[in-house]
Image (spheres, coloured by chain):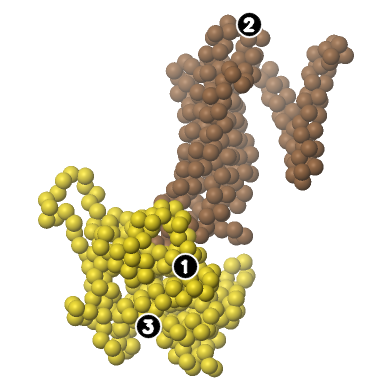
């Protein structure tokens, strides 16, 4: 229907974005009726998202002719931004930004570097940056989930943790069940994505490749490759972030510093 | 002075803390076997090293204090929780910390166990500044029992094994039974903690702390969350431990009658400050 109204591709894209945003806001209004207030957060997130992605699209357009090494700077910038976004999910956790940024850098960076070296990811900016950004984004989401879950679990089990400490447990042992639970919970989306691939969803990358004329089987296999890389990057990120944050919620005298109301 | 008796609970080559030798017949021995970190088989005679710790029960009151605080203070965001608390506890003595709700009793106990860091002053354990003792060793020495038992979801036996396991030691089956007998729960070893009553869970919690063979037992309102029957059961277990076995104990309680039944001395806290301390009868009837 929109295609009948808009012949210009830019106007059509804006109209499609508007319709999709309205659908998202309808959900927010339903949530509001149940007393869950997400209006301002969702609105700001959507506005930020559309501005950021169109900016990046424009930059990519400019970078098509730039030397290949510039993609390293772009990806590094993305990692810093991902660290800052992710750290917000860990309110009150000491050193959350640094933990997030280092974990995402290690998790996604090592997978991107290895896969680029092996030739799984093409070194062209138009390939490295989009695929790299997918890994970084998913690592960011996983990191946010892990830190958020860990924080909630620790705050809900202060008594158990301090009991273990009082019985002479090492700080890291006193929170080990919560480190494990956070790691497992943070990987649920990545595992479910792999599990439901092709049955529940056909990811955007594959759809894009099909639209641009790639052979369906190659597009499908490459989509699996990307999801497997996402899983590896997310897993590594979550592993590192839970271990790093674990050591930061205790003082040098093995006292639990993450406490309700402190 | 009654003859000293000894509870022998843990696995470390520490000698009697206060140099009071007791007759063998007057001891209850609980042995801890050190678990081997080496997976290779070892000769049978070396398989289990046994470490016996003696805790004198009624050391002479003239001996040096087992625990002494000096101007111990803690403030969080300008809120004073404990201020200039100075007191001492001698071996075999039971000290009650009493005071109204919010007076800083539990905060003081947490400082003793170093679950919180003092913002002023310090604690001396057997004459040593407790900041010079590794936190894990300190917490083993000053065993804390919380108001709520916070048992780990497993069997009673596994809960009792937890503390020694942290040091790579395995509590023997005999020790487990003796500890459970001490708290009136003989035969409970294989029970799942999910099936215990509140009073039973609290007694398991006490036994679990004792499995670490503490020098001093710190009890934080151990009966305040219990009904009357459970309260009596837990209190009688504590009686057995502190009175019959003579373990040095600091008990936080808002129940002055309980303090009078259990303690030798008391200190009264108000707004984080010690307002009086002395023999139980004098302090509570002042």
Residue at screen point 81% across, 24% down:
A19
Residue B186 % position (x, y): 33, 65
Q: Return the disc, 1 or 3, that comes first in the chain's sequence.
A: 3
Q: Is residue B105 above or below residue A216?
A: below
The chain letter for the residue carrying disc 2 is A
Horizontal arrangement in the rendering, residue B230 relative to residue A24 (left or right): left
Badge 3: how crowded within 10 Å, few (<14), some, or many (20+)?
many
Query: Percent x, y for residue B120?
Result: 50, 73
Question: Residue shown at 49%/81% (left/top)?
Answer: B258
Q: Label 1 is found on which chain of the structure?
A: B
Which one is nearer the viewer's eye here, A43 or A156? A156
Badge 2 element: loop
Q: In this rendering, do the residues under marks 1 and 3 share a single chain?
A: yes
Q: Secondary structure at mark 1?
A: helix
Q: Which chain is yellow?
A: B
Q: Name the mark on residue A213.
A: 2
For disc 1, the marked residue is B199
Q: Chain of mark 3?
A: B
The reply to whether residue A125 is visible in this rendering is no
Q: Quadrant of the N terminus of chain B?
A: bottom left
Chain in brown, by letter, is: A
Name the mark on residue B93. Answer: 3
Q: Position of residue B57 (x, y in %)?
A: 30, 80
């Amino acid at each position: 229907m929109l295609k009948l109204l808009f012949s210009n591709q830019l106007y059509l894209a804006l109209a499609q974005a508007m319709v999709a945003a309205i659908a998202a806001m309808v959900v927010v209004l339903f949530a509001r009726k149940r007393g869950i207030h997400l209006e301002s957060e969702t609105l700001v997130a959507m506005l930020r998202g559309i501005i950021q992605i169109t900016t990046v699209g424009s930059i990519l357009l400019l970078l098509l002719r730039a030397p290949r090494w510039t993609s390293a700077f772009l990806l590094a910038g993305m990692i810093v931004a991902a660290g800052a976004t992710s750290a917000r999910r860990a309110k009150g956790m000491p050193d959350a930004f640094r933990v997030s940024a280092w974990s995402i850098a290690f998790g996604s960076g090592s997978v991107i570097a290895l896969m680029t070296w092996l030739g799984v990811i093409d070194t062209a900016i138009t390939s490295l940056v989009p695929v790299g950004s997918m890994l970084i984004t998913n690592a960011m989401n996983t990191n946010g989930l892990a830190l958020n879950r860990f924080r909630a679990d620790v705050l809900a089990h202060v008594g158990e943790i301090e009991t273990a400490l009082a019985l002479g447990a090492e700080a890291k042992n006193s929170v080990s069940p919560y480190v494990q639970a956070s790691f497992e919970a943070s990987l649920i989306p990545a595992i479910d994505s792999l599990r439901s691939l092709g049955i529940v969803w056909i990811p955007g990358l594959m759809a894009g490749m099909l639209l641009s004329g790639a052979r369906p089987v190659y597009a499908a296999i490459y989509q699996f490759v990307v999801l497997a890389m996402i899983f590896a990057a997310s897993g590594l990120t979550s592993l590192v972030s839970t271990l790093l944050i674990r050591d930061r919620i205790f003082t040098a005298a093995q006292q639990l510093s993450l406490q309700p109301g402190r | 002075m009654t003859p000293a008796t000894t509870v022998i609970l843990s696995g470390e080559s520490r000698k009697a803390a206060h140099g009071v030798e007791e007759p063998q017949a007057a001891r209850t021995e609980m042995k801890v076997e050190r678990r081997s970190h080496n997976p290779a088989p070892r000769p049978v005679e070396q398989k289990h090293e046994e470490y016996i710790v003696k805790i004198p029960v009624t050391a002479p009151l003239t001996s040096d204090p087992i625990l002494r605080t000096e101007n111990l203070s803690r403030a969080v965001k300008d809120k004073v929780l404990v201020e200039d608390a100075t007191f001492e506890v001698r071996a075999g003595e039971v000290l009650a910390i009493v005071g109204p709700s919010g007076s800083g009793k539990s905060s003081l106990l947490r400082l003793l166990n170093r679950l919180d860091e003092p913002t002023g002053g310090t604690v001396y354990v057997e004459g040593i500044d407790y900041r010079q003792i590794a936190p894990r060793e300190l917490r083993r020495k000053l065993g804390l029992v919380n108001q709520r038992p916070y048992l780990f979801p497993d069997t009673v036996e596994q809960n009792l094994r937890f503390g020694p396991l942290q040091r790579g030691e395995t509590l023997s089956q005999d020790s487990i039974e003796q500890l459970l007998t001490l708290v009136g729960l003989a035969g409970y070893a294989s029970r799942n903690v999910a099936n215990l009553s509140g009073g039973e869970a609290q007694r398991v919690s006490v036994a679990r702390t004792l499995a670490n063979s503490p020098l001093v037992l710190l009890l934080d309102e151990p009966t305040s969350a219990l009904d009357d029957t459970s309260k009596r059961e837990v209190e009688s277990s504590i009686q057995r431990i502190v009175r019959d076995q003579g373990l040095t104990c600091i008990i936080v309680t808002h129940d002055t009658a309980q303090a009078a039944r259990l303690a030798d001395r008391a200190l009264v806290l108000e707004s984080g400050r010690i307002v009086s301390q002395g023999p139980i009868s004098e302090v509570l009837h002042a």
